[in-house]
Amino acid sequence: MGAIVRTKDLLDTFNLTLVAGADGIHREIITSDISRPGIEMTGYFKYYPKERLQLIGKTEMTYFLELSPEQRKDRAEKLCTDITPCIVISRGMKVPKELIEAADHAGVPILLSPRKTTRVTSRLTNYLEAKFAPFTAVHGVLVDIYGVGVLITGQSGVGKSETALELVKRGHRLVADDSVEIRQEDYDTLIGTSPPLIEHMLEIRGLGIINVMTLFGAGAVRSYKKIALSVNLELWDNKKQYDRLGLDEAKMRIMDVDLPKVTIPVRPGRNLAVIIEVAAMNFRLKRMGVNAAEEFSERLTQMIEHEKDFID
């Protein structure tokens, strides 16, 4: 899981004002789900998801203000439980005193937003889903090549960082070296970043640590990138049969996502940077519906059929 999220993080990140319940700003938010307590305003609390962030928009507030003072007090006290992380009120609406009193008493922060309810919902949901996204770290290098996030993997010493350096020299952008932190967004998207300690750094054996941004400029790095392709470097094995046509569709699984995977054998004289560059371009072509391997296979089949017809 991602990092612990507290109500204070929302205050620090968004344009929100704390109007009550200051004692609870360190309460933990445990889910990205946001609740709009409309039915609770009517007095029905049987299925109240009290552990969620509560968002009160114009609809809920209008109904609440039409209740009697006793009903307002009752609803406010039931909304403010010991585990409710916060109540966000949109559109900069005036907060009723019953809600302020209940929030102060229970230590539930009330945060006021000047934005429309739908806008607040989408921004808070996106923020929380990113924070709670499944997370892992992979030993490898992540480079943005022609807009394609390429994760380069392989055993230690195979030449991943040196290849990344060559790619940066060729105008591509480094995201992470050595350790790639990966979070899964939605069900099919992997976002790779660098650990803060080694951001923009490359370790080159014999030279040590180099700062790519200082050497090559801000255009040579980026802070995060969606991973689209995995390239595995392995030492050349004469006994192994390597794919020569590119018809085999190998995959690398990270968390719940299957990435297309290319295995490139390494031996002296092979320009890995150029090969990986072409692999990224070829991947883009495949996404556009152009598959050179299938095209060659079809041509070969047609030629064989033509030869058979000629012999017959």
Image: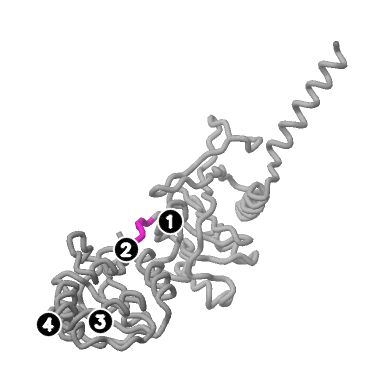
Q: For the residue marked with disc 4, what is the amino acid?
A: His
Label 4 element class = helix
Residue 164, percent across and down? Answer: 55, 60
Q: CA distance from mark 2 to mark 1?
A: 14 Å
The residue beneath circle 1 is 186
The residue beneath circle 4 is 105
The residue beneath circle 2 is 33
Name which of mark 3 and mark 2 comes first in the sequence.
2
Name which of mark 2 and mark 4 comes first in the sequence.
2
Span of residues in magenta: 132-137
What crowding class fits label 4: few (fewer than 14 Cα within 10 Å), some (14-19), or many (20 or more)? some
Position of the N terminus, as image quadrant, is bottom left
Report whether residue 197 is seen.
no
The residue beneath circle 3 is 110
What crowding class fits label 3: few (fewer than 14 Cα within 10 Å), some (14-19), or many (20 or more)? many
Of the pair 175 and 157, the residue shown nearer to us:
175
